[in-house]
Each structure stands twice: as C-alpha cells, then as structure tokens.
Amino acid sequence: QVQLVESGGGLVQAGGSLRLSCAASGLTFSMYDMGWFRQAPGKEREFVARVNWSGSSTSYPDSVKGRFTISRDNAKNTVYLQQNALKPEDSAIYYCAARLRGTAGYNYWGQGTQVTVSS
C-alpha cells in the first residue's frame, strides 16, 4: 500500500520560512518524480514544484520561483519543500504527489498539510 505523508506545515508570519516534508512508503521511490501542489479555499489546485527521480531537475511556477526549493533524499524516501519569504497568498493545504517516471499523470497523493501565513 502506497502512502505519502506530509508534515511540517503550520502558522507563520509573512516573510518567514517553513520546511515541508513528504515521507513515501510502499513504492520504489527512485522510480517516481515527485511534486508539490497546493489548494486554497475556493480555488483550484495549483502546481508548486516538481523534482525528477534523481533530483537533477526541478521546476517551479513563477509565483514561487526564487522563494521555494524542492529537494529529495532517495535514501530516506522523502521529498522536501523549503519555503522562504512566505506571503499570505501562499496559505493553502499543501499536497505531495508521486508520478511514475516517463508518465504524465500523478499516481499517488498525500493527505496534505496546512500552511497559514499571517500578514
């Protein structure tokens, strides 16, 4: 049974930092690209970051580029999202997801962790 478990969310003031973690089990972690997404109340789910299976390639939308950094540790089956210079508009539930190498869609999703940024 595949599980993705996020942690590290919380309440932080604008300008602050958080580090989210996503621990994976039940899959061969190095076979999967990993992504972070977020969803705020009343809004559609939004792509936040992606890292390829080896960690050699990353991708971000303009809204978080330069502030967020995705990384992974294949020995620990964990992907991270370092969030710096947080803004109130970054407030959302953050989800990690796993995508099998060479495929388009994400196969597995975590339950999410809440990030709230106060102004």
Image (spheres, helix red, strand yellow):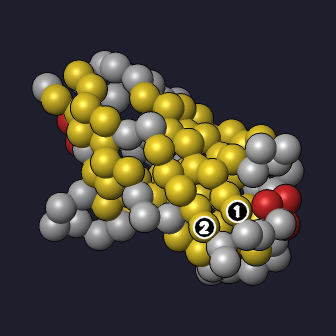
Residue at position x 23%, y 22% from top? 13
Question: Where is the C terminus found, in terms of image quarters?
Answer: top left
Badge 1 amino acid? Ser
Helix or strand or loop: what does disc 2 sit on?
strand
Disc assigned to residue 35: none
Position of residue 83 measured from the top left corner of the image (x, y, whole percent): 46, 32
Looking at the image, tell me whether mark 1 or mark 2 is earlier in sequence order.
2
Label 1: element kind: strand
Residue neighbourhood size for the residue with mark 2, other residues' Cα within 10 Å, grouped as few (<14), some (14–19), many (≥20): some
The answer to whether 73 appears left or right of 87 in the picture is right
Foreground residue among 38 and 74: 74
Tell me if residue 5 comes above or below residue 63 in the rendering: below
- On the question of residue 62 being in view, the answer is yes
Q: Nearer the viewer, residue 40 or 79?
A: 79
Residue 53, image x, y percentages: 81, 57
Q: Position of residue 33 (x, y in %)?
A: 73, 62
Q: Quadrant for the N terminus, please.
A: bottom right
Above or below 67: residue 2: below
Q: Which residue is mark 1?
A: 25
